[in-house]
C-alpha cells in the first residue's frame, strides 16, 4: 500500500467491490475468502505498507480498505482495488478447475477465470422484445 504516514498499526481489509469500506466500521462484514499474515512492515519514509502472504480462494476484483491505526475514531477508507487471478500462467484462464487457452463461447474472462456471459444468456433482450423481420435469399 502506498500513501503517507503509514504504520504497522494500520489495519488492512479486502472486501468485494459491491461492499463499501465504510461499512466495515461497524464490524458488520468479515471476508473469509482472504487470508494474510499478521506480519506488516513500513518503509523508512512511512510511505509504503508491505503486507505478506496474502492469498484468496476466490478470483475477481475486490476493494482494498485500510483503517489507520493512529486514528481510532476513524473507520476504514478505500485505498485501492485488488485483482485476484487464477493460478494459471498468462494468457491462460481457469475453466472448471483447468487452465485453458480461451473461454467457451458462453463465458467471458474476468480476472483470469471464465465466468458465465450474462449477455449471451439474454440474446432477445439485446434486440428488444419486438419481433424482427429477417429476409433470407436462397439459391
Image (cartoon, rainbow, N blue to C red):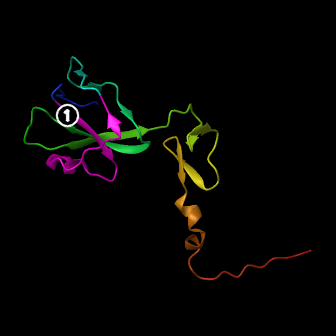
Residue 16, given in percent of the width and then of the height, sits at 34, 48
Whether residue 122 sits left or right of residue 35 in the image: it is right
Residue 75, given in percent of the width and then of the height, sits at 14, 44
Q: What residue sits right under mark 1 in the picture?
A: 11
The image quarter containing residue 61 is top left
4 versus 95 height, above or below: above
Q: Which residue sits at x=57%, y=44%? A: 96
The image quarter containing residue 53 is top left
Which quadrant of the rendered structure holds the N terminus? top left
The image quarter containing residue 59 is top left
Residue 116, given in percent of the width and then of the height, sits at 54, 55
Q: Is residue 110 magenta?
A: no
Whether residue 137 sits left or right of residue 76 in the image: it is right
Q: Dot 1, crowdedness within 10 Å: few (<14), some or many (≥20)?
A: some
Q: Which residues are magenta?
A: 10-36
Whether residue 28 sits left or right of residue 88 in the image: it is left
Amino acid at each position: 500500500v502506498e500513501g503517507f504516514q503509514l504504520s504497522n498499526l494500520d489495519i488492512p481489509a479486502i472486501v468485494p467491490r459491491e461492499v463499501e469500506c465504510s461499512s466495515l466500521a461497524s464490524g458488520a462484514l468479515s471476508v473469509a475468502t482472504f487470508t494474510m499474515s499478521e506480519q506488516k512492515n513500513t518503509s523508512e519514509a512511512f510511505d509504503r505498507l508491505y503486507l505478506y502472504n496474502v492469498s484468496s480462494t476466490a478470483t475477481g476484483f475486490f476493494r482494498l480498505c485500510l483503517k489507520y491505526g493512529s486514528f481510532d475514531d476513524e473507520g476504514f477508507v478505500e485505498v485501492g482495488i485488488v485483482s485476484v487471478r487464477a493460478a494459471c500462467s498468462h494468457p491462460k484462464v481457469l475453466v472448471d478447475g483447468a487452465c485453458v487457452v480461451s473461454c467457451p463461447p458462453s463465458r467471458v474472462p474476468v480476472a483470469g477465470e471464465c465466468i458465465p456471459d450474462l449477455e449471451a444468456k439474454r440474446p432477445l433482450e439485446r434486440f428488444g422484445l419486438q419481433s424482427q423481420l429477417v429476409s433470407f435469399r436462397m439459391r
